[in-house]
Structure formats: structure tokens, C-alpha cells
Image (spheres, grey):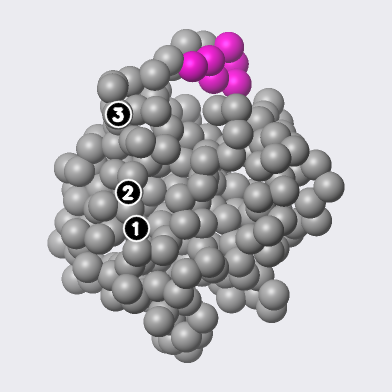
């Protein structure tokens, strides 16, 4: 992308506007995009990419002073991005609990908000993360799904897959967000843990942290 594509969580009635954003990688952030971020008062960037991706595509922050934290969303013992998307989404449901707890805790740090969450493209790892946060805030599934599917328009995927070169110079395809991918993750979490809230609490999130998240972000 030539500029920053931001999807702010502005439409869900349970979420306070202007505090949580998602985007693709910031390695091609332009000066104009940086000025847009500055106007948002952004303070924290949570980067869900693998270390190899971060090294190959470092963020271009221009003059922005941001707290940037890298929290790899996928296990680092294999190249899971070679797997089919449905399998990657199932893997996220099964393994990302500890990372998601850390995301919540980073958002609760003093002066952490407004915050932006991103991965490489901004729809898969980021989409799951934002979906979990929205569920914790009480947003209905249909609104969570609508926010997730907004990625297609923001990333130019409305007309189908887009090819790109990964950090190793290999040709890859970015596929459009599909409803069944995200609903599959949420269904899997709920089937195995009872609820998204129980999923996070089972991975160490404390009840008082959940309450603090809702106090900070819920309307």
C-alpha cells in the first residue's frame, strides 16, 4: 500500500470511538499518513508480525513518537504462513490465547490509548485479535464480522486475491477476508472454552483486567 489504511472501530455501539484502530504494516507509511496518525493522538502500536517480517519491513514512523511492541501472533517453530488460511485460523484459535492476553495488558498500560494493532496485511492475525477484543466488549457477532469484512475494501481485495512478495522474496497471494474464516475461529473458541471471555481468563487474564478493558474501551 502507498499510504496508511486505517479501520477505526467507530460503528460498534459498544466501543468508544477514536481509541482502537487496525491497519496493515507501517513499512510504507507516508509522511501524509504519519500526519494522519499524529492527528489521532496515537500512542501505541502493537505489531503482530513474525520477527523476520519486522526485520525485512521495518515500520516507517517518520517523526512519530510511539510505543511500538512486537507480539508475534503465530508460533515460531514453523512457517505456518505456507498453510491454507482455514488451517492458519484454526491455529490462531488454538495457540494465540497467551498473545491475546498480552495484547489486552498492553492496552491497559498507562497512556497506551489510542492504540493501533497491525500485522502484515491487517486482516488475518489483526482481524482475529480485533474480533476477540470486540467480543470482550460485548459487540454482537454481526458487527464484529462487518468490521472484519471491511478489510476487503480497505486493502483492494474486493475484486479477488492480490499477489505480493514476502520477506524471503517468494510470491504469495493475499486472499480476501471470508466470513467463514472468522466465524470458524469464534465458534472454535466457544466450543472449546465456552466463551471468548473464558478463553482469555483460562490463559491468565484476570477478571479485574477484563473489567478495566471494558471501562477503558466500552461505551
Give the class, few, some or many, for how many residues have Cα within 10 Å of label 3's Cα (few <14, many ≥20). some
Residue labelled with disc 2: 148
Where is residue 123? Give x, y as percent. Answer: 40, 41
Q: Which residues are magenta?
A: 164-169
Marks 1 and 3, Cα distance to the nearest angstrom? 20 Å
Can residue 9 be seen here? The reply is yes
Mark nearest the camera among 1 and 3 is 3
Q: Is residue 85 left or right of residue 27?
A: left
Q: Residue at x 60, y 27 (%)?
A: 2
Viewer-side residue, 204 vs 33:
33
Quadrant (top left, top right, bottom left, bottom right) of the C terminus: bottom left
Magenta stretch secondary structure, dominant: loop
Q: Are marks 1 and 2 in contact (CB under 8 Å)?
A: yes
Horizontal side of 210 relative to 72 (left or right) equals left
Q: Say whether disc 2 or disc 3 marks the residue closer to the N-terminus.
A: 2
Can you identify the residue that label 1 sits on? Answer: 131
Distance, label 1 to label 2, CA atoms, is: 7 Å
Q: Nearer the viewer, mark 2 or mark 3?
A: 3
Q: Secondary structure at mark 3?
A: loop
Amino acid at each position: 500500500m502507498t499510504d496508511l489504511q486505517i479501520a477505526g472501530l467507530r460503528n460498534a455501539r459498544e466501543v468508544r470511538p477514536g481509541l482502537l484502530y487496525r491497519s496493515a504494516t507501517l513499512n510504507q507509511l507516508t509522511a501524509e499518513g504519519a500526519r494522519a496518525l499524529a492527528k489521532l493522538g496515537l500512542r501505541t502500536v502493537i505489531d503482530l508480525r513474525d520477527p523476520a517480517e519486522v526485520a525485512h519491513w521495518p515500520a516507517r514512523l517518520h517523526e512519530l513518537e510511539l510505543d511500538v511492541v512486537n507480539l508475534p501472533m503465530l508460533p515460531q517453530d514453523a512457517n505456518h504462513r505456507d498453510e491454507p488460511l482455514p488451517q492458519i485460523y484454526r491455529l490462531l484459535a488454538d495457540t494465540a490465547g497467551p498473545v491475546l492476553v498480552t495484547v489486552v495488558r498492553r492496552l491497559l498500560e498507562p497512556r497506551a490509548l489510542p492504540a493501533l494493532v497491525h500485522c502484515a496485511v491487517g486482516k488475518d492475525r489483526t482481524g482475529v485479535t480485533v474480533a476477540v477484543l470486540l467480543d470482550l466488549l460485548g459487540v454482537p457477532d454481526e458487527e464484529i464480522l462487518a468490521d472484519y469484512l471491511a478489510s476487503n475494501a480497505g486493502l483492494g481485495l474486493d475484486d479477488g486475491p492480490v499477489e505480493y512478495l514476502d520477506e524471503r522474496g517468494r510470491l504469495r497471494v493475499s486472499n480476501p477476508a471470508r466470513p467463514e474464516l472468522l466465524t470458524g475461529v469464534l465458534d472454535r473458541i466457544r466450543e472449546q472454552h465456552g466463551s471468548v471471555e473464558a478463553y482469555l481468563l483460562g490463559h491468565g487474564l484476570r477478571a479485574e483486567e477484563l473489567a478495566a478493558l471494558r471501562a477503558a474501551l466500552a461505551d
